[in-house]
Amino acid sequence: MDEAISSVPMNNLIQSGHTVLFRLLNGETRGLKVDHGSAVSLGRLGSFPANALIGQRYGLTHEIQGKELNILPPRVLQEVEDTDATNELITDGELVQPLTITEIEALKQSGAHAADIIKAQIEQHANYELKTEYSKEKYKRRKEAKYMKAFTTVEPTLHNVCEYWFKKDHNRIRDLRPDTLSQMLNLGSIRPGGRYLAVDDASGLVISAVLHRLGGEGRLISICDVDSPPAYPVMAQMNFAKDIIAPLGTLNWATAQPDYAPAAPQEESSSGEPRSDRHRQRLDRRKLANDALQQTRNELFSGEFDGLLVSTEYDAFEVVQTLSPYLAGSACIVVQHPYQQPLTELQMKMRAIPSYLGPSITESWSRRYQVLPGRTHPMMSTSGTGGFLLHAIKV
Amino acid sequence: MWSTARTVAAGDIVIIWQTRESVQPLLITPGKDFNSKFGFYPHSDLIGVPYGSKVGSRNGKGFIHLLRPTPELWTMALPHRTQILYIADISFITSWLDIKPGSKVIEAGTGSGSFSHSVARTVGARGHLWSYEFHEARANKARQEFSDHGLADIITLTHRNVCKDGFTVTNTVDSVFLDLPAPWDAVVHAKNAMRKDCTSRICCFSPCMEQVLRTVNALNEAGFTDIAMYEVLIRPHEVNEITIPKLDDIVTKLKQSEQKREEKRLRQIANAGKRKREGSSENAVENGENKKAKTDGANVTELHRTSELESTSTSAKGVGPQALQGADDSASVNGAKAVYEVRGHTSYLTFARLAPIADEA
């Protein structure tokens, strides 16, 4: 098993067309498309040519210097020496920073490096020496975040992308926090080669997650509420290669009904002389699309799927009841909802039906800690919810 | 891994689900029997049955469900050799470490193999797990188990003290998981094993804060970045149909009860008068009965409360309210609440990232 390391997988390198997550020093993360020949603009930090980034490894820290990017060494925690200083002599509201905005702007214009600006500020700071070492460290960090034009590219892992969306717009992903999402994938027992059904009204987060865990092997049929395959906004940041998306097939709630019949009669495409080459091409394309749809429908109806993952705006019980006939014995069912009540109702209804074994409701709780030498404590603010999960086994 | 066939075959490992609290693995061996308080089942009866079936016992004592093992069911059912990892931590670690099909992963120690099975399922045939266990007997047991579960190609198990001797691979793995008493002693070894051409990740699993602090220092000194520490817990909720009696009903009931008591008192006075006239006096009895009537009233209310708590979809509706006169309109709702006692702490999860080494400019 000790084979030589293969070359860097393509997805670990930033490629033209990728949507890259940029983490700034102040902790903010932005997602921007990086196209060959274009400029990447990071607002206050300025802009740089995309070509400087294309081909680089994900996860490096860069500093913008003019039109160039310099790679910075990874940032490590600073050991802080404990002193006797306290804030006893520091009074609130006093003007302690005589370096004016104009002076700072002048320094910036003169091309001074962020480190020089911060040094000048510290020298002018009336109370700096009165601060505790912890406080000095915090001050320096804050100023660095303000003046350093540095960013780290964030690898497009499922965890990072989910976290990005959770911070950016948790409503659009139905409050699915990374820990809750990870529990869905494990409770659903998603494995490469497995066959799954998913209902995703969470901007494609659930679909992306399952595709991520299929790794290009197996099958995923997504049942959606629009007439053509939806655009899944979350998938943009995942930067999936073609082979990872290959397992995905799409039906909508109408085409997923056994009695569905297309509004346009089938014969139109097969019988009758095409009027022109373009007409023939159009008919052929239409037939191809129709055949693909029929094939996906047949696949659904022949059943034996290994699991069902749901995060839906629709009635969860209707969704589960509609799709559970296509699940194999012992298949996993996982339903996420931002509100508890719909899952409470769902659990009540499911436990009256013998084909659902052990429907259970859980809620994930997670807390992040600040870990700095001598300053370790839980974060002062934390996310209150990642939604609720119901899981059961089809029997 | 485990069987993916539709039906159970001889030699399969199946999960026997008796109740939520009683989930156990079973190796299907023709000629053997499975016996429990839910009945008697010859293994041969289970062969050919589709996975997910409900099977009745030979002696009519009950039934079981035959499930296909998943790492999550295995975690519920596995024989404990050590303290094990549960789904909250396993799934979060898998997510943060970005373990996915094709990932190359290290874990130390193997323990009871709860995490190992989950990782093996997720990395699949294209990935690999190097698992290290310093306790020889446990290492041998786990090796046998992995082989029985068809994981021999995915998991390489080595009996070794990684804190002293390091790992068997270098510049290879995407992620490392350390569940060791002193993970800080293995951090530099872990760094050697991790790949440097792209981001690789580490997680250290420690129950105590003191361990976390030492680990953070070791990670920092070894050049790891983005050190982050988390706790993750799962709160199970129970769902009950709860009846909500109307205040009007209890007012009516209390009034009726008072009315009855008053009628009884008057009856007793009348009777006592009669008895007195007949020459006997037993006031003590009268007082006693009066007290008893009061207690009966309180009991009804108490019974009612109990039924709220224990109610399920069928049991509670009506028990309390219908016992009351004119109480047909008492409401019921489906309520969910966190279960009374939950796991409050497992371990702190300390994560860090090893940034790739940049290409030479």
Image (tube, coloured by chain):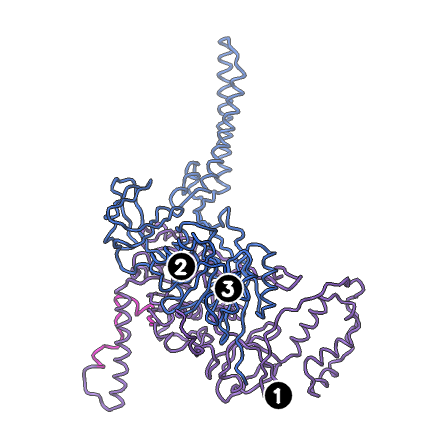
Q: Nearer the viewer, residue A282 or B343?
A: B343
At label 2, counting other C-alpha atoms closer than 10 Å, the crowd grade (few under 14, some 14-19, many 20 or more) is many
The residue that label 3 is drawn on is B166
Q: Is residue A236 left or right of residue A264?
A: right
Given the image, on which type of amino acid does mark 1 rest? Gly
Separation (CA) of disc 1 from disc 3 = 45 Å
Query: SS at mark 3?
Result: loop
Place of residue B257 in the rendered image (x, y in percent of width and height, measured from the top left): 49, 31
Q: Is residue A199 left or right of residue B53?
A: right
Q: Residue at x 48, y 20 (%)?
A: B267
Q: Nearer the viewer, residue A321 or A198?
A: A198
One can see residue B48 in this view: yes
Decide: is A206 above or below A62: above
**Do the residues indicated by labels 1 and 3 lie within the same chain of the protein?**
no
Q: Residue at x 23, y 81 (%)?
A: A269
Separation (CA) of disc 2 from disc 1 = 51 Å
Mark identifier at residue B117: 2
Place of residue B361 in the rendered image (x, y in percent of width and height, measured from the top left): 55, 85
Give the magenta range.
Answer: A248-269
Chain to which mark 3 belongs: B
Decide: is B101 above or below B331: below
In the rendered image of the structure, the colour used to display chain A is purple
Q: Which chain is blue?
A: B
Decide: is A23 above or below A302: below
Q: Is residue A96 left or right of residue A236?
A: right
The answer to which image quadrant residue A39 occupies is: bottom right
Q: Residue at x 52, y 53 (%)?
A: B346
Q: Nearer the viewer, mark 1 or mark 3?
A: 3
**Do the residues indicated by labels 2 and 3 lie within the same chain of the protein?**
yes
The residue that label 1 is drawn on is A66
